[in-house]
Image (spheres, helix red, strand yellow):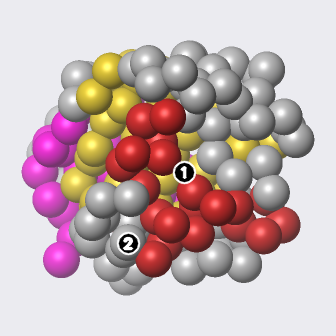
Amino acid sequence: MTDFKTADLLDDHEDKPLQVVQPGFYNFGGRPKFGGEIVTIKIHEDNSLVREFVALEGKGKVLVVDGGGSTRCALLGDMLAEKAAKNGWEGIIIYGLIRDSVDIGKMDIGVKALGTIPLKSVKRGFGVKGEPVHFHDVTFTQGHYVYSDEDGIIVSPVKLVG
């Protein structure tokens, strides 16, 4: 699913209620262009649910992690990103930070986040699965679709590619 440009998708689907994520996310994965069906989790400085979801089959899906924009710890590192890539996830969008960015940059998975920090998160098993999450002026609803490339991120209620 890498044969698209977000700018073209917006131009070609002006009749659909597409949402554009405000700037502030950086590419960290080895796959700068990715998209798929949205799977949502909401967490706070605890990446237990990230660990749980990347262990699942993710073909055609993008994990959207609402980490509240916290800059206190990383919600994804190289081991979890590698597990996600092996399980077929198209990408991970994190409203928060990651670590091990150089290693993640060599993996065949899309990863967007606000930045990096070397500190890992706690693991207490708290969080919410499958609920709509809202950040950067966009609501990400599980089952809708997200498309990300070098120009940004867009969200659609219907599949636009493939």
Q: Amino acid at mark 2?
A: Asn
Place of residue 159 in the rendered image (x, y in percent of width and height, measured from the top left): 15, 59
Instruction: Find numbered disc 2 in the image and state the secondary structure of the residue it sits on.
Output: loop
Q: Is residue 59 visible?
A: yes
Q: Which residue is depicted at the point 40% across and 79% down?
A: 2
Q: Residue 78 lies in what quarter of the image?
A: bottom right
- Mark on residue 152? 1
Q: Residues within 10 Å of mark 2 (few under 14, many from 20)?
A: some
Q: Which residue is depicted at the point 45% across and 25% down?
A: 125
Residue 154 or residue 112, whichever sits in front: 112
In the picture as drawn, the residue positioned furthest to the front comes out as: 124
Q: Is residue 35 magenta?
A: no
Image: magenta residue range? 138-162
In the picture as drawn, the residue positioned furthest to the right comes out as: 118
Place of residue 50 in the rendered image (x, y in percent of width and height, measured from the top left): 47, 42
- Mark on residue 87? 2
- Which one is closest to the eye, mark 1 or mark 2? 2
Q: Amino acid at mark 1?
A: Gly
Q: Is residue 25 visible?
A: no
Q: Quadrant of the N terminus?
A: bottom left
Q: Is residue 151 left or right of residue 78?
A: left
Q: Is residue 63 left or right of residue 77?
A: left
Q: Residues within 10 Å of mark 1 (few under 14, many from 20)?
A: many
Q: Is residue 101 left or right of residue 45?
A: right
Q: Residue 121 lies in what quarter of the image?
A: top right
Tags 1 and 2 touching, CB below 8 Å: no
Above or below for 81 versus 67: below
Q: Which residue is depicted at the point 28% across and 44% down?
A: 39
Q: Residue 119 lies in what quarter of the image?
A: top right
Q: Is residue 146 magenta?
A: yes
- Mark on residue 14? none
Give the Cα separation between the discs numbered 1 and 2: 25 Å
